[in-house]
Amino acid sequence: MTNVTVLPVVGEPAAEDEDHEQRERQYAVNVLLAEAGEVGRVAAGWVRELAARQAQERHRTVLERAADAVERAAGREVVPGGDGQLDEELAYDLAAYVVTGNPYAEALPELAMGERIALVAVCALAAAMPRTVLGDLERELPALAATMDAAVTAVL
């Protein structure tokens, strides 16, 4: 009687390598998405601090909506495979008018010039983040997140 050893059938090495590379790339993208989301949450927190300082409720509301929009655009709106578009309301809340606040308020929001500049930058960067899924997300998203972080850090 001859001893026969049965070995398990293993898939093609090339296919396994491709699967491994795909998992590694997906993990890297997930890390980038999480990092951008965290930067967005921090920036949104800063915008909420600006809102809390406002004496006029109308300005507080505009800035709170902008903060929510920054957090959403830097986070769950960045969807690989998505269309990269912001809905109209989100785009409106991220528009540069946030520095002038509500048009029916008695005066402009209480913001220093540096805060106004950083606020416009944060909103513009957040609005650009979802579009990174249409290009080179792994190159563009970290650049936008780092610039957003720098804008907030510059005024703290």
Image: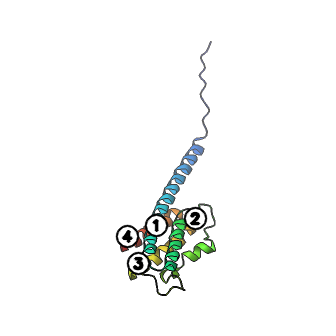
- How packed mark 2 is, by other alpha carbons closer than 10 Å (few <14, some 14-19, many 20 or more), is many
Q: Quadrant of residue 148?
A: bottom left
- How packed mark 3 is, by other alpha carbons closer than 10 Å (few <14, some 14-19, many 20 or more), is many
Q: Are marks 2 and 1 in contact (CB under 8 Å)?
A: no
Per the image, the residue denoted by label 4 is 153
Q: Which mark is residue 55?
A: none
Q: Give me the C-alpha separation between circle 3 and circle 1.
A: 18 Å
Instruction: Of the two numbered discs 3 and 1 on the same chain, state the one appearing first in sequence.
Output: 3
Applied colour scheme: rainbow
Front-most of residues 25 and 57: 57
Q: Are marks 3 and 2 in contact (CB under 8 Å)?
A: no
Per the image, the residue denoted by label 3 is 115
Q: Give me the C-alpha separation between circle 4 and circle 3.
A: 11 Å
User: For numbered disc 1, what is the local secondary structure?
Assistant: helix
Instruction: Of the two numbered discs 1 and 4 on the same chain, state the one appearing first in sequence.
Output: 1
Left or right of 148 on screen, residue 4: right
Q: Give me the C-alpha separation between circle 4 and circle 2.
A: 23 Å
Q: Which mark is residue 77?
A: 2
Front-most of residues 17 and 144: 144
User: For numbered disc 3, what is the local secondary structure?
Assistant: helix
User: For numbered disc 4, what is the local secondary structure?
Assistant: helix
Going by the numbered disc 1, the residue's amino acid type is Ala
Going by the numbered disc 2, the residue's amino acid type is Glu
